[in-house]
Amino acid sequence: MSTGIKHGALFATSVEVVCTVNGRPVRLLLDPRESLLDVVRERLALTGTKKGCDQGQCGACTVHLDGRRVLACLTPAVHAQDADVLTIEGLAEPDGTPHPVQQAFIDHDALQCGYCTPGQIMSAVACIAEGHAGNDDQIREYLSGNLCRCGAYPGILAAVQQAARAAAEG
Ligand code: FES
Ligand code: FES
């Protein structure tokens, strides 16, 4: 932990955070008030993660922290200490092959403007991994924190069904 002067006479405390982001080691010196969302977008230039409401209402900012989905706008970036952060940019295979959930969204045309899509996909990946994609009602419930103002819900549901079936079949 180090201290420094910020904004004239105001003192701010900087915190060193070491973590991995999409498999790459990252070392950051952060203001403890910074959200994980602002850090991935503004410091790491990973702008696939979207800022919708910035207050935990829309799900557009969903990322994974140690394999669990979190709302990055409500997560202090310092919580990433020693953790693995996964954003939409890290989901595909290194050779560019889309993740099965990404492919399912393409197959079912499960988007219109696309603004909510990274969050939808990160939530869907977690939803399937959690075992919460067993039927339509379950998928709707466990993706209910991800809003789509375009109303692409039928396509999203079909995409998650396809990806869940594929995951179940191994
Ligand atoms: Fe985080 Fe809306 S931007 S929930
Ligand atoms: Fe436009 Fe969902 S595709 S907000």
Image (cartoon, rainbow, N blue to C red):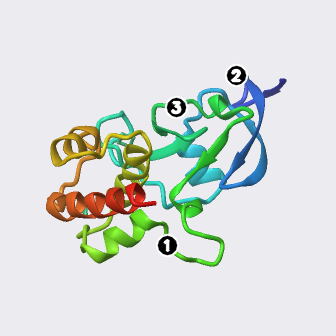
| Closer to the camera in the image, 41 or 72 | 72
Q: Earlier in the sequence, mark 2 or mark 3?
A: 2
Q: Quadrant of residue 107?
A: bottom left
Which residue is under mark 1?
98
Residue 149 pos. (x, y %): 18, 55
Mark 3: which secondary structure?
A: loop
Q: Quadrant of residue 134?
A: top left
| Closer to the camera in the image, 99 or 112 | 99
What is the quadrant of the N terminus in the image? top right
Asked if residue 152 lies left or right of residue 130, the reply is left
Mark 2 Cα shell of 10 Å, populated few (<14), some (14-19), many (≥20): few
Q: Which mark is residue 10?
A: 2
Labels 1 & 2 near each other (Cβ < 8 A): no
**How many numbered marks, from 0 up?**
3
Which residue is under mark 3?
75
| Closer to the camera in the image, 66 or 152 | 66
Residue 123 pos. (x, y %): 39, 47
Q: Quadrant of residue 39?
A: top right
Labels 3 & 1 near each other (Cβ < 8 A): no
Q: Is residue 142 above or below residue 25?
A: above
Hey, what amino acid is under mark 3?
A: Thr
The residue shown at (33%, 42%) is 53
Mark 2 vs mark 3, CA separation in Å: 24 Å
Residue 61 visible to an observer of this rendering: no
